[in-house]
Amino acid sequence: MKKLALLVVLFTFQQTYSQTHSHSGAQPMTYPDIDGYKTLKTDLHQHTVFSDGNVWPTIRVQEALRENLDAISLTEHLEYQPHEADIPHPNRNRSYDLALAEAKEHDLLIIHGSEITRSAPVGHNNAIFIQDANLLNVDKAEKAFSEAKKQNAFVFWNHPAWYAQSPKGTPVLSNFQEKRIKNGELHGIEVINSIDYSEEALTLALEHNLTIMGTSDIHGLIDWDYTEKGNHRPITLVFAKEKNMESIQEALFAGRTVAVYNDLMVGKAEFLKPLLQNSIEIVKSEYRPKSQVLEVQLKNVTSSDLLFENQMEYTFYDSSPVFEIASGETKQLLIKTLDTKTEIVLKLKALGCFTAPRQQPTIDWKVTID
Ligand SMILES: [Zn+2]
Ligand SMILES: [Zn+2]
């Protein structure tokens, strides 16, 4: 009887635990949806001990849950296995399998991936949404790419500006990449890799219609490299019809992304502009008594601090024309509209956001005055 009671208690505990436990951390990330799409937070370039990373795959899952990510991929180097003597793993799908098991009870999608690793000019490339990593582990890079295509993988060029492979720190698009793009075997490019941002990579993305990516390429701990320094990891926001594998894959092939690292956002105008539009909520708009000084309160609902510059004909009463709204904070603007209006168009340039190199978008918000 006692035994049975203990069993019941254990069973109940297990059930409650699996239904309620979460790994949510102190700084979960949040970004608003845009019209027609869910905004999914993804980090699609990460390493574990199954290549040259320092942690077990389960830790990557728990880190992602702490930051409220929607999808991750563990992209182990196929060809670089420094822990091989301690952790021999002829099956290159093992890292994915372990992450998948860990994520089972959670709302986190694990995308099967691998990093195809060569010296320049091939460089490093992630193939994600693969079926079997073992089949990509072949001698010739061309073969690895054609196998990835066979598996319907989405492939992106990693850290193309990495100075270890490109000493000037700028990406060099070689015949190899040109051919892969032409063959439909290369679909995206990292413009943000760990703490690095390459404007030249953005130019290549726009010129060759490659999907704009931002990733952490984490090898150690997210907490040590980012969180405890007051940063979030770099991510790719994917604008997907639904939160599922097929929708993310479709969105990546269609190029619906914005790369984000803290206050830096990089994306095609058609996605970055609506994202910014929804990133600011107007929570108050009211004239100061007996005046034409309009008080507008703007709330930044994202996890990025946003820097703006006034683009209106009206000037401000008490603020610099350049101002920041910190993540989650509300900023009060006093706008001198000269006449009493019933509505105005608030026009701000987002100085930390780029739709092309050195090109920052200006966003209009229609403000109805209470
Ligand atoms: Zn790499
Ligand atoms: Zn990597």
Image (spheres, rainbow, N blue to C red):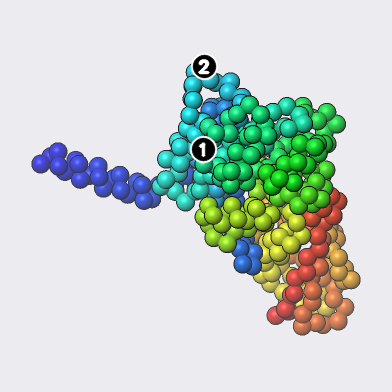
Could you tell me if residue 328 is visible in this image?
Answer: no
**Residue in view at x 55 percent, y 31 percent:** 48
Could you tell me if residue 185 is visible in this image?
Answer: yes
- Kindly indicate the quadrant of the structure image that contains residue 311: bottom right
- Kindly indicate the quadrant of the structure image that contains residue 140: top right
Residue 303 screen position, x and y as percent: 64, 52
Which residue is nearer to you in this view: 210 or 224? 210
At mark 1, the secondary structure is: loop
**Relative to 234, residue 118 above or below:** above
Which residue is nearer to you in this view: 4 or 181? 181
| Residue 132: mark | 1
**Relative to 275, residue 60 above or below:** above
**Residue in view at x 75 percent, y 74 percent:** 366
Which residue is nearer to you in this view: 313 or 122? 122
Residue farthest left in this picture: 1
Tell me the quarter of the image containing the N terminus.
Answer: top left
Residue 337 screen position, x and y as percent: 85, 76
Number of other residues with Cα within 10 Å of mark 1, as a class: few under 14, some 14 to 19, many 20 or more: some
**Residue in view at x 49 percent, y 48 percent:** 108
| Residue 85: mark | 2
Q: Nearer the viewer, mark 2 or mark 1?
A: 1
Q: Tag 1 or tag 2, which sits nearer the N-term?
A: 2
**Residue in view at x 36 percent, y 47 percent:** 18
- Kindly indicate the quadrant of the structure image that contains residue 124: top right
Q: CA distance from mark 2 to mark 1?
A: 23 Å
Residue 104 screen position, x and y as percent: 42, 45
Amino acid type at mark 1? Asp
Q: Is residue 59 left or right of residue 188?
A: left
Number of other residues with Cα within 10 Å of mark 2, as a class: few under 14, some 14 to 19, many 20 or more: few
Amino acid type at mark 2? Ala
